[in-house]
Amino acid sequence: MFDNLKFNADGLIPAIAQDADTGEVLMMAWMNRESLALTVEKGEAVYYSRSRACLWHKGETSGNTQKVVGMYADCDGDTLLLKIKPNGPACHTGEVSCFYNAIIENNDFPQGSTILYALQTLIKQRKAEPVEGSYTNYLLDRGVDKICKKVGEEAAEVIIGAKNNSSDELRYEAADLLYHLMVLLVNQGLAIEDVFAELAKRHQPKP
C-alpha cells in the first residue's frame, strides 16, 4: 500500500490533517510506516513524534481523536493529506487549528462553507448554554413555529430583493435567510452536513 511513497532519510513522511467537512487545514505532523499501518488499522490518525521518538495516537490522552475518512498522497508521493473528522481541537493550545498565527491575512476573501460551520457551532452553543439577550436564544425558546415564520418572512424578503434588482438587498436578505435556516436545522436536530450530503447525493450522475 505504501510502496510508492517517498520517506525521508529518517523513514518519515509529512502528513497534513484537513477537516473533511469544512476543508480547514488543522495540523501537520510526521508519520512512518508503522504509524501509517496503525492509522489504516484503527481508522484514527496515528503519527510519529520526533521529539519523543515514539508513535503518537492523536487524542490518546486528550480525547481529541481524529477519525480518518480519506488518505491521499501528493503527485510526488512525498507528502500525505489526511481528511479527518476531528473529535475536538487539533492544536494542543485548544485552538481548532494549529495554523492560527496570521502572517498575511485578507479578511475580505470569501470564507465559503466554513462560515456556515462556524455559525452552526455558535447556534449549538447558544442552545446548550443560553445567553441573556441573544436573538438566537429568543428564536430557540419560542420553538419551531416562530423559527418557521421567520424563515418564511426572510424567503419573501429574498424574493423582493431579487424583484427590486438590488444586489445589496438580495445579498443582505439571503444572509438573513441562511441564518434563520441554520437555526431551524439545529432546532430540528439536523446539521448543515446533512444538507450537503443530500446535495451530493443529488449531484451524482444517474445510471
Image (tube, grey):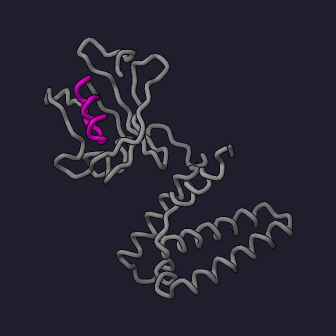
The magenta region covers: 33-47
Q: Residue at x 76, y 67 (%)?
A: 169
Count all numbered tags in the image, as a single digit: 0
Q: What main secondary structure does the magenta stretch of the protein show? A: helix
| In this view, 8 is above or below 56 | above
Magenta stretch contains residue 37: yes
**Among the 4 quarters of the image, the one containing residue 3:** top left
**Among the 4 quarters of the image, the one containing residue 18:** top left
Q: Where is residue 43 in the image (x, y as percent from the top left)?
A: 31, 41
Quarter of the image for the C terminus: give it: top right
Magenta stretch contains residue 94: no
**Among the 4 quarters of the image, the one containing residue 124:** bottom left
Quarter of the image for the N terminus: give it: top left
Q: Where is residue 100 in the image (x, y as percent from the top left)?
A: 39, 44
Judged left or right of residue 207, residue 9 is left
Q: Residue at x 32, y 22 (%)?
A: 13
Q: Which of 62 and 69 is in front in this view?
A: 69
Q: Nearer the viewer, residue 184 or 133?
A: 184
Residue reaching furthest front? 207
Q: Residue at x 56, y 52 (%)?
A: 113
Q: Where is residue 168 in the image (x, y as percent from the top left)?
A: 75, 62
Judged left or right of residue 160, residue 33 is left
Q: Which residue is drawn at 86% across and 69% down?
A: 164
Q: Where is residue 182 in the image (x, y as percent from the top left)?
A: 55, 68
Judged left or right of residue 111, residue 30 is left
Residue reaching furthest top? 9
